[in-house]
Image: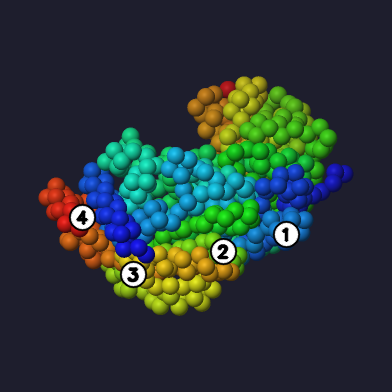
Amino acid sequence: MDTARVDQLKKIANGVRKDIVTQVYSASSGHPGGSLSIADVLTYLYFEKMNVKADDPKWEDRDRFVLSKGHASPALYAVLAAKGFFPKEELVKFRNIESFLQGHPDMKHTPGVDMSSGSLGMGISAACGMALGAKHQGKAYRVYSILGDGEIAEGQVWEAAMFSAHYKLDNLCVFVDRNGLQIDGETKKVMNSDPLDEKFAAFGWNVQVINGHDFDQIDKAIANAEACKGKPSVIIMDTVKGKGVSFMENNAGWHGAAPNAEQYAQAMADLAAND
Amino acid sequence: MADKIATREAYGAALAEFGAKYENLVVLDADLAGATKTGVFAKAFPERFFDCGIAEGDMVTVAAGLSTTGLIPFASSFAMFLAGRAFEQIRNSVGYPHLNVKLGATHGGITVGEDGATHQCLEDFALMRTIPGMTVICPCDAVETRAAVEAAILHDGPVYLRFGRAATPVLFNKENYEFKLGKGIEIADGDDAAIIACGVMVDVALSARELLKSEGINARVIDMHTIKPIDEELVLKCAKETGAIVTAEEHNVIGGLGEAVCGVLSEKLPTPVLRVGTEDTFGRSGKVAPLMEMYGLTPQNIAEKVKAAIALKK
Ligand SMILES: Cc1ncc(C[n+]2csc(CCOP(=O)(O)OP(=O)(O)O)c2C)c(N)n1
């Protein structure tokens, strides 16, 4: 990728991270860790890759995105707002009773959200349905989805993995946000999924493993996925949970906790240093 | 003697028939296409049929995804594995976003027969009724099934349809039958009591009415094919005009049609209601007729409850 463009994307992603922290701080609740770990890939998808129209969110030929790990909604909302799907001022109303920004994505009320999610394990199946619908109707759009590395313990993920390989859904590209942590601690200790690449390969997928914070690697991996015909693609991204906020990084305690005023100031200062 | 056709047979035939009329109709199954009769559709429209393997949860959410692309998916399995196994997928990925997914559940109730308790779903009405925005239908014969399938196609939103395994009498005439979602049908008149039934129990209720007639009791019979939204107007009319209600369903008395009727009457017009259904128990293997007897789902059981309900009138 052009280095100037990478710099632009980094800047957008840093803004997304600030908005993630601000949403969780405003709501005094939410999931910062797993939102921060996907800020880069979501920024890349919405600002570099996906064919979407902010002024026509239900445009039928748009590319689709399903946030299977729905608790990372602050990352999706921040990107959608940055992209112009709704005013940025809405973000501070996250999880507020009067807001359309629900704790977990709600496709009925939030412009730009393609599928409601939040119950782990289901989003990937919905993405399969969308990809199958595209193929069935001869549509060229592509479908993207992000799973958590804890989420993949759900049996439904592997039902969907079999389904998408069986129906040769090469218009489906799934990311696994392998940040190594879930609620009860390290994924390796809670329910080890290693070797994840071999598991997906055995299920008939095109598998790539990348650094999920490196735009060049994200760019190449998605291009590879697009070029791969006859099977679905998975991009396993090694990431840092809490990425960008010093005290949240690699700390399971920040999975679903909100910062206090002092921590918020510190987090914003950490992120400002990356501007 | 009326023809006997299982409602699942009529379901498969209806899908194949309407597949020609509605091009965006697609069908999914979870390795039971032979039994649910979606195989009939699969044969007619192979490119619009998707077997999902034995993975009901995935099938339901795939159907949700398909519906967002403008297709009208019917997802089928046995009632137990659809409403039961995939309850949360139905609740969160179909019900919550109010997607246009149709759930065609066959093998509902005790008349599954020999396969026994694990396959006899007596809880699906309860599970499906509690999901906001879900329409719940249980047709009583082949003619009503055909019409219900088309009504489900034309309705924008999630619909759960329950069909039976066993062959049952055809009660209606295709030529003059009209299905209105949420509107029950009075199929036999009478002013001493009203029997509000659905599914196979409609025919059983008609037999009960004959038994009662020989004792000088005139019972009205209502075919309440739509359990949700329940036809409040008709329930209140029956209560007003007869003063005694008996409900009949092939389902646990907890959470089904009976409780839907009780819900209306207890709030709007308190009236004695007695419920015929399975009495908070699991089923067992056996032939259909002895099972219906063992679980209290016979014309005699209904007739007795009608007399008891009449005795409760003030
Ligand atoms: C079916 C289901 N079970 C449990 C939860 C509660 N839950 C929310 S997030 C989470 C951990 C997710 O871990 P992971 O997938 O690794 O996400 P990340 O670490 O990227 O945030 C759990 C158990 C849920 N939302 N859905």
At label 1, which amino acid type do we have? Pro
Could you tell me which quadrant the N terminus of chain B lies in?
top right
Residue A227, how many percent across, how many down? Answer: 52, 68
Determine if marks 3 and 1 fall on one subunit: no
Determine if marks 3 and 4 fall on one subunit: yes
The chain to which mark 4 is attached is A
The chain to which mark 1 is attached is B
Look at the numbered disc 1 and say if its residue's Cβ is closer than 8 Å to ligand 1.
Answer: no
Residue most toward the right?
Answer: B1
Residue A77, how many percent across, how many down? Answer: 35, 47
- Say which residue appears at 51% left-offset and 71% top-offset: A205
- The alpha-carbon separation of the residues under discs 3 and 4 comes to 21 Å
Determine if marks 3 and 2 fall on one subunit: yes
Answer with mark 3 or mark 4, whichever residue precedes in sequence: 3
SS of the residue at dot 3? Answer: strand
**Residue A80 in sight in this render:** yes
